[in-house]
Image: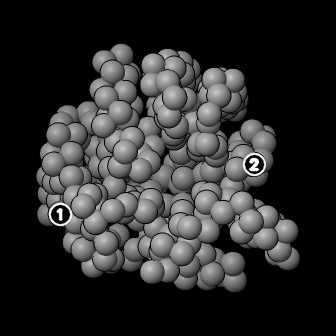
Amino acid sequence: MLRSVILAASRSSQVERLVATAPYTRDVVRRFVAGAATDDALRATRKLVDDGLAVTLDHLGEDTVRPEQATATRDEYLKLLKMLAAAGLTPAAEVSVKLSALGQMFDEQLAYDNARAICAAADAAGTTVTLDMEDHTTMDSTLEVLSRLRKDFPSTGAVLQAYLRRTESDCRELSSAGSRVRLCKGAYKEPESVAYQSAREVDKSYVRCMNILMSGDGYPMLATHDPRMIAIGEDRARWFDRGPERFEFQMLYGIRPEEQARLAGEGYTVRTYVPYGDEWYGYLMRRLAERPANMVFFGRALISKK
């Protein structure tokens, strides 16, 4: 019920205006979003890399309905990648890209062309791209674009969401050698016909999917803040004899920084997902809806560094 309420609020312009003008909103946003400009993203990336963390950067914005918006998003990523390379921040920093921000909703070929240009720029910068996953209606399209991109850019990463019933099968398909797969729980409102509805079922699916990826030949990227899932990930790495160079943990910017530092200090690769840009509202609301416990994490993060 709470998740449905939050997701409904994420689509409400009235709630967005209320949140955007509320006291303390700026402090909350600053804690979880690197800033509005490319320079803000670079500053955050530099600090994280200096602290021994890897980074993936997401330029916020997915409600793209015109070709010029898609072109502007592409150009921002090209600019970002050039600046990351010039600053010596690659390959530690990569980028995460939503195809919907590149035109997927009205022109899949345009989205592919834009994504391919970003992959080429990433390759020239000495790093790579991960294609973010959105709601289930775009999944087949996204995986098709991924397949096309991997022909020339095999390190392009995929994202799979454990709350979808199909994800175990997708994990098997994408667990081949060289395949980078980020496994997360999922952040969109989906019908019961395609997605598990309870946190317990999503957690069980996450573990099953983790087992498939960790036992496969690809490169799993375990995106979770859940202490139990992290502990299970550490256990599975030992069970499947995966050294720290053969998988990684991923967490959101501003969430559990001490845990990120602990894991990195123990030799694991920890990649921080760093969003930036003006369109922060939908991002924050989906992160809250992704799992009720995230509300606790966000709240604690405002008053502590754990």
Residue at image position (27%, 79%) is 200
Residue at image position (22%, 40%) is 174
Residue at image position (17%, 40%) is 173
Q: Give amino acid for label 1.
A: Arg
Quadrant of the frame with the N terminus:
bottom left
Name the residue nearer the viewer: 303 or 270. Answer: 303
- Other residues around mark 2 within 10 Å, as few (<14) / some (14–19) / many (≥20): few
Q: Give amino acid for label 2.
A: Asp
Residue 251 image point, x, y percent: 49, 61
The answer to whether mark 2 and mark 1 are in CB contact below 8 A is: no
Which of disc 1 and disc 2 is earlier in sequence? 1
Name the residue nearer the viewer: 75 or 229. Answer: 75
Image color mode? one colour
Disc 2 versus disc 1: distance between alpha carbons? 36 Å
Mark 2 vs mark 1: in front: 2
Classify residue 22 as left or right of residue 89.
Answer: right
Residue 238 image point, x, y percent: 19, 63
Residue at image position (22%, 66%) is 205
Quadrant of the frame with the C terminus:
bottom right
Classify residue 89 as left or right of residue 267.
Answer: right
Q: Which label number is shown at residue 278?
A: 2
Classify residue 184 as left or right of residue 207.
Answer: right
Circle 1 — which element?
helix
Residue 282 image point, x, y percent: 62, 57
Circle 2 — which element?
loop
Residue located beneath label 1 in the image: 208
Q: Say above or below: 9 vs 245.
A: below
Name the residue nearer the viewer: 261 or 136. Answer: 136
Q: Is residue 300 visible?
A: yes
